[in-house]
Image (cartoon, rainbow, N blue to C red):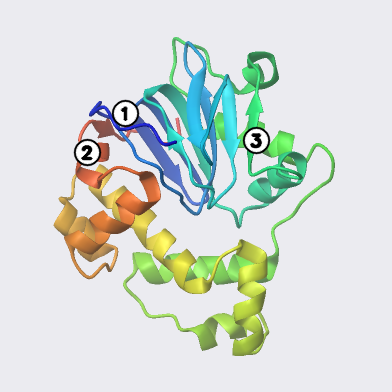
Amino acid sequence: MPIAPNRQSWKGNVRIRPGLGVFQGYAGDNTEHRHWAHQLSIGQGSDLMVVSGGVRYQAAAVFIRADTPHQLIPGSVLSIYLDPTSAIAKGLCLRFFADSPLVTFSSSEIQWLVPDQDRPASINDVDGKLSRLAIMDEVLSDDPKLKAVITALERSIRHHEEVGRHELASLAALSESRFSHWFREQTGMPLRSYRKWLRLIFGMERALRGHNLTEAAHEARFADQAHFSRTFSQAFGVSPSEALAHMKVPSDPSS
């Protein structure tokens, strides 16, 4: 069963780039949740514990497939979030998710990814290591049609533009009816859900860079702060005010 939250605060550094997010620090209070990113969490200094499907897992690291309900027990972690549309994410899924939505690793299996304890994790280093792991068995490349659709969606959110299903279907050279099925096959989710996920990440970026939650919600095109907070809590198991209060973005987020 999920563990009752113990009111411990989140604190650490966050780095975000398209398709990849990295959190390093203390993962505090959270309830069972699910989100549209694959998650690789690594214990820092000791094993981590995760509850999923009524089962408690304790391991050096755990890889959780997108949309898998889970609860991370408070502790020091390095958590990596991968957009499921990326080639890296697809490659990792081919390697690790054949039989289970959750995979655990021993310290020896994951040691290659753990940064030196005297320096923070570099998002460039994490990206490079995951890329090498993902293509170890076969070379994977981004689908140019999917890449064009995702780029259009991201641009529409950042520039407050409208991009409809018809335009997106044209980018993929598909009819609107076929596009809906194709998009779900490619991403594992409906277009509406993926668009909401992108808006949530954009709102989170704005909040981390000093905007209050009302401003962040507006910039990410949520109806209001309550809508943004509710969506955030469903995705991460903790409210944005609790999760983001003690987090910071390094001056060079790629470092």
Q: Distance of mark 3 from mark 2, alpha carbons?
A: 30 Å
Q: Closer to the camera, 30 or 76? A: 30
Q: Are marks 1 and 2 in contact (CB under 8 Å)?
A: yes
Give whichever of discs 3 and 2 has the lower sequence position. Answer: 3
The label on residue 242 is 2
Q: CA distance from mark 1 to mark 2?
A: 9 Å
In the picture, measured across the screen, residue 22 lies left or right of residue 222, that is: right
Quadrant, the N terminus: top left
Q: Nearer the viewer, mark 3 or mark 2?
A: 2
User: What SS does tag 1 mark?
Assistant: loop
Placement of 79 over or under 199, stated as above or below: above
Q: Which mark is residue 130?
A: 3
Among all residues in the image, which is located at the extreme right? 137
Mark 3 vs 2: CB contact within 8 A: no
Q: Which residue is mark 1?
A: 28
Q: Position of residue 17 (x, y in %)?
A: 46, 46
Image coords of residue 202 (percent x, y): 35, 56
Task: Rate crowding at label 3 as few (under 14), some (14 to 19) or many (20 or more) other CA atoms within 10 Å.
Answer: some
Left or right: 233 with respect to 176? left
- Tell me if mark 1 has few (under 14), some (14-19) or many (20+) residues whose alpha carbon lies within 10 angstroms of its own: many
Please, what secondary structure does the residue beneath circle 3 have?
Answer: helix
Mark before the other along the chain sequence, 3 or 1: 1
Q: Which mark is residue 104?
A: none
- Note whether residue 122 is visible: no
Residue type indicated by callout 3: Leu
